[in-house]
Image (cartoon, rainbow, N blue to C red):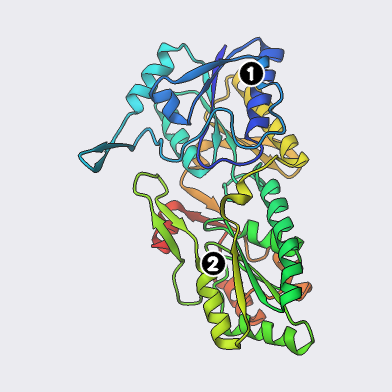
Amino acid sequence: MKIGVLTGGGDCPGLNAVIRAVVKTAINDYDMSVIGFRDSFEGLILNNYVTMDKGSVSGILSRGGTILGTSNQADPFKYPILQKDEYIYLDRSPELVANYERLGLDAIVAIGGDGTMTAAASLSKLGINIIGVPKTIDNDLYGTDQTFGFDSAVVTATEAIDKIHTTAQSHHRVMIIEVMGRYAGWLALASGVAGGGDIILIPEIPYDIEVVCNKVRERNRQGKNFSIVVVGEGAKIEGGDMVVNRVIETSPDAIRLGGVSNQLAAQIEGLTGLETRVTILGHLVRGGSPTAYDRLLGTHFGCEAVRLAARKIFGRLVVLNGRDIDSIALSEVAGKIRTVPLDSLLISAAQSLGISLGVEKESLERLKSSNNTDEKTIANKKEVAT
């Protein structure tokens, strides 16, 4: 057999661990040949690839990023082309299919998040034998209990929160740390609990600014003259909208969130009179070496993807189901995201620790009974953001 491998969407720690596992498993266990496509599906459209062997993946296990490069603007069904200062969009999937057939490929392993898997599901319908591997620091890919890259991002964000603590204590300030996560609060919630945040705001629970300020005032009355607020970039005030930083029309997911922390800082400072500072971690949480957990999870995912290819089981996404590596149909994943359920054990733990989630407990209970935030469509999330 001859298989290809590519990485799509935003980069994250652990991508190279998956590439390494795919190449080594393919060669060692099945005597397959492997080619790597550069810059996501663009490499398959433009016929830009490199032949891979065990030497080409030597020493990459601990490296962040991806040796193959990536892109979040290489949607084969809506490929942007700049003409006369204006973008037009072309369906280049026929070129992709032609290159796939010309190269004599038996399968493609596509490593990416929801955008990559949506494209992969559509390519599967065109006859491309494709297997997905779930990647994102946001942990929002539907169908898997965890994506690789998430643990590394949580560790990086937690270390940053630890460092913010010392300056917050020294200057008696309210410190807001904004983390990525898009429309899901997994990263903010996990790093906020692990980093000892006092207030955690996530997209799934619109915050009441009075509740936030009351928590800050309460801490001051208790002699705790600083507060740590961890906020996901998709968090929003009750009755308000998510803060959109910019719109990139050439990207399949055009909306870029960010900046809610600046809005929140102005609100807290104006209502409490307490000096409030902002740190937006941004792409910092995407970088660096993967944790041991992400190296292991990525390795398991990569090995399983090749095993599925060897058994000619295609159109599947490799997933973590409890403690087991499993797979589900790509068609079940396309167009969906996985948000934090309001009955999450981590939300319960945060409440038990006295962490404010930006709403009164009664309001959260009402939200639980009226809302199921565990699954949303991409169309809905974009409508909410705009």
Q: Position of residue 15 (x, y in %)?
A: 62, 34
Which label sits on residue 56? 1
Q: Residues within 10 Å of mark 1 (few under 14, many from 20)?
A: few
Q: Which residue is mark 2?
A: 235
Please report contact status of discs 1 and 2: CB closer than 8 Å, yes or no: no
Residue type, label 1: Ser
Quarter of the rendering containing residue 211: bottom right
Identity of the residue furthest to the left in this view: 84
Quarter of the rendering containing residue 219: bottom right
> What residue do we see at 73% from left, 86% from top?
220
Q: Secondary structure at mark 1?
A: helix
> What residue do we see at 70% from left, 21% from top?
58
Answer with left or right where residue 55 lies relative to residue 263: right
Q: Position of residue 289 (x, y in %)?
A: 70, 40
Q: Position of residue 333 (x, y in %)?
A: 52, 43
Answer with left or right where residue 132 lies relative to residue 128: right
Against 116, is 202 above or below? below
Q: Nearer the N terminus, badge 1 or badge 2?
A: 1
